[in-house]
Image (cartoon, rainbow, N blue to C red):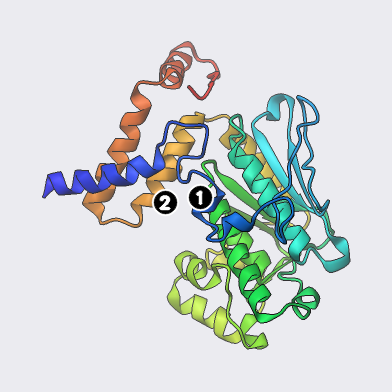
Amino acid sequence: MVVAFVAVAKSVRQQCLKRSPKPYCHSNFSSYIPFHQNFTSNSKYGVQKYQFQSNRTFILQSATQSVKLERLSDSDSGILEVKLDRPETRNAIGKDMLRGLQDAFEAVSNERSANVLMICSLVPKVFCAGADLKERKTMNLSEVQDFVSTLRSTFSFLEALHIPTIAAIEGTALGGGLEMAMSCDIRICGEDAVLGLPETGLAIIPGAGGTQRLPRLVGRSIAKDIIFTGRKISGKEAGSIGLVNYCVPDGEARLKALELARDINQKGPLALKMAKCAIDKGVELDMQSALALEWDCYEQLLDTEDRLEGLAAFAERRKPRYKGE
């Protein structure tokens, strides 16, 4: 039986710990998007090229400017930030914005120096209002199916990124906006935030992961209450039920996210990846198999320069200088 448990753990680890430039939990976007062949520069949801502008920061170049990707610099090097900026629709996700999110997450997955990702909004008092329903009304049934499937795949890609991810929520996070936040590892909101999954009021259900991620975060009964009624909850209630990790004074969500990102950014990059893999994959296994997976992930870190650097820094009472090697 022990051999069987170890075999299961090693099989999972092989999916998680590929020694390649790609993230450890997936090889490319096509592993989450079933119709990836349609994602070309001329297609409806085409992924556009992104361009590095300097060694300090870069802004995503895509068909839309509603999503901006920035690399922080100097002591914050290693922290990346996705900024939502579509004020005319309260950051509602339409086709162009979805392309921008795809571009941003793909760029992050290919950025070897990235240690942590933050997602925030540049629009005051709104994180993301959900899907662009005005645009949705112009779509036929096939287009709606493709759009929702792509949105779901995009959030799954975000969830499986190899680095820790943090959503900083100020104001409204409804429908797809909350589903995007739930795809992150950590959520922070302001006290005046308004969160919810109102889809049943439109005679549909959350279709980008909401029915699955919400109960895993807050429990089945509370998730049913929120989804069945479509009610909106406050930032304080979101904190009390475990939907968010931190509820902070209004306007301070990004500051708290940056504080956490800086703390995470000081840790061993390979250790962060292995910890995320062990947690995310381990919860899907029985305890003995999960413990075998944990040891397999731990073992991957033993023969690394960062582990030796951590020990040396501890002995010398200085901050470690990790290289991700």
Please tell me which residue is depicted at 49% across the width and 52% down the height of the picture.
31
Q: Is residue 125 above or below residue 39?
A: below
Where residue 176 appears, as percent x and y from the top left, is 65, 68
Name the quadrant containing residue 271: top left
Please tell me which residue is depicted at 69% across the width and 30% down the height of the picture.
76
Please tell me which residue is depicted at 67% across the width and 58% down the height of the picture.
189
What amino acid type should be assigned to the residue bearing mark 2? Asp
Where residue 232 appears, as percent x and y from the top left, is 67, 77
Within-10-Å neighbours for mark 1: few <14, some 14–19, many 20+:
many
Q: Which residue is mark 1?
A: 160
**Are the residues tagged 1 and 2 within 8 Å (C-beta)?**
yes
What amino acid type should be assigned to the residue bearing mark 1? Ala
Q: In the image, 28: left or right of 2? A: right
Within-10-Å neighbours for mark 2: few <14, some 14–19, many 20+:
some
| Residue toward you, 123 or 310 | 123
Q: Residue furthest right?
A: 88
Q: Which residue is mark 2?
A: 280
| Residue toward you, 225 or 18 | 18
Q: In the image, 232: left or right of 287? A: right
**Comparing labels 1 and 2, the label whose residue is closer to the camera:** 1
Where residue 230 appears, as percent x and y from the top left, is 62, 82
